[in-house]
Image (cartoon, helix red, strand yellow):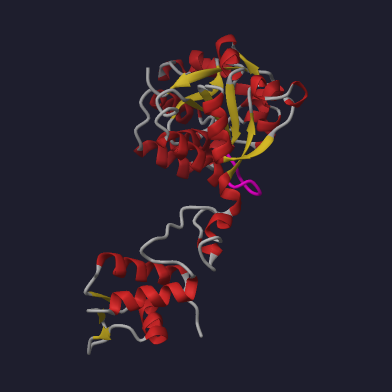
Amino acid sequence: MAKLTKTQFNAIQTVVFNRSPRTKLTNNWQKIFDQFAIGEPDGAGKHLYFSGKDYDLLREMAQLDTGFDVQNVSFNQPRNTLAAQGKKEKYANIRPDANYVLVKLPPQCYPPFAAQYSLRMTVEQVEAVCLQFNLLHLIVVENLDSFDEFKHFQFEQSLGCVIQQAVIIYRGSGAHSPAGCKRLLHVIAQNEVLQPIMQISAFTDLDPAGLQIAQLLQGCRYLIAPTLVNESAPLLPQQAQLFQQSPLSSLNDPDDFDKQWRQQKYLDKVTLHNWRKLVDWLQQHRISIKQQHMLAHQLELTLIPIQE
């Protein structure tokens, strides 16, 4: 006998929870009807009608099939937690890697010998550490190699002081899912203690893709970028030739900038506040400067707020 898919379970859950008198007879509902024979199709084969005990029967059959009660289950949890409630642990919305982040903690959170290492922690563990040590800063790093070498970048003094008290998070890609970072930022936004006090910053490549990443990070209000940007970005169009004299010019890859047309299109449509001047400057000079060059050439880095 065929088993319910997650989509089919969700369809039953919606009908039962809302006591819907009818639903469209989609492919999924046709399969549910073929399996359980609950409800009454109309003559045209367009809708399936429910009444009386149909809702209790749907609830009972779904629970027999999956182990979950459609009236009392949430899939917004990891698989190992959901497994205690039913047979279909893969229905969990939080995948095994989506609840973990790679993190570097401030020195006061480590034993003395361990500060050089990164940790793989659950979102809840990072949240607890932030609360326990009253941490006020979180920095999301775009590239894994830059995350690994983070302490070797050159930071201006005030930013350096911030970093000594900051949680450093790898954004995630490839083998390390970005879902963990995304969920951590959502959890912080929902935490009534952390949300008002946590300053979230992004350290990305200086290019349209990097700015898009920063803009999409929930709660992000600062971008870490070379201090030379503050000197170059305000230049008027007629002063464009002055950029060619900037140390940034020799590190720039305009061909890579041209490949990021989708990110440019996105940035043109969203609200960027103070970052709009930065984006205009990137586009004016076709700028793409990678984190690896910022490290190799020891460019001094500073914070650029999204709002003045």
Q: Is residue 209 visible?
A: yes
Q: Nearer the viewer, residue 237 or 53?
A: 53
Residue extending furthest bottom?
Answer: 43
Q: Residue at 58%, 27% (x, y): give it.
A: 167
Q: Residue at 41%, 66% (x, y): give it.
A: 69
Question: Could you tell me residue 158's position as x and y percent?
Answer: 55, 11
Asked if residue 22 is positioned above or below residue 111 in the image, the reply reads below
Residue 226 as seen in the image, left or right of residue 149: left
Question: Could you tell me residue 164's position as x and y percent?
Answer: 62, 17
Q: Is residue 138 visible?
A: no
Q: Is residue 98 magenta?
A: no
Residue 66 as seen in the image, left or right of residue 155: left
Magenta portion: prevailing SS class: loop
Residue 276 as seen in the image, left or right of residue 258: left
Question: Could you tell me residue 154's position as x and y percent?
Answer: 65, 17
Residue extending furthest top?
Answer: 157
Asked if residue 15 is positioned above or below residue 114 in the image, the reply reads below
Magenta segment boundaries in residue numbering: 171-177
Q: Is residue 172 magenta?
A: yes
Number of marks present in the image shown: 0
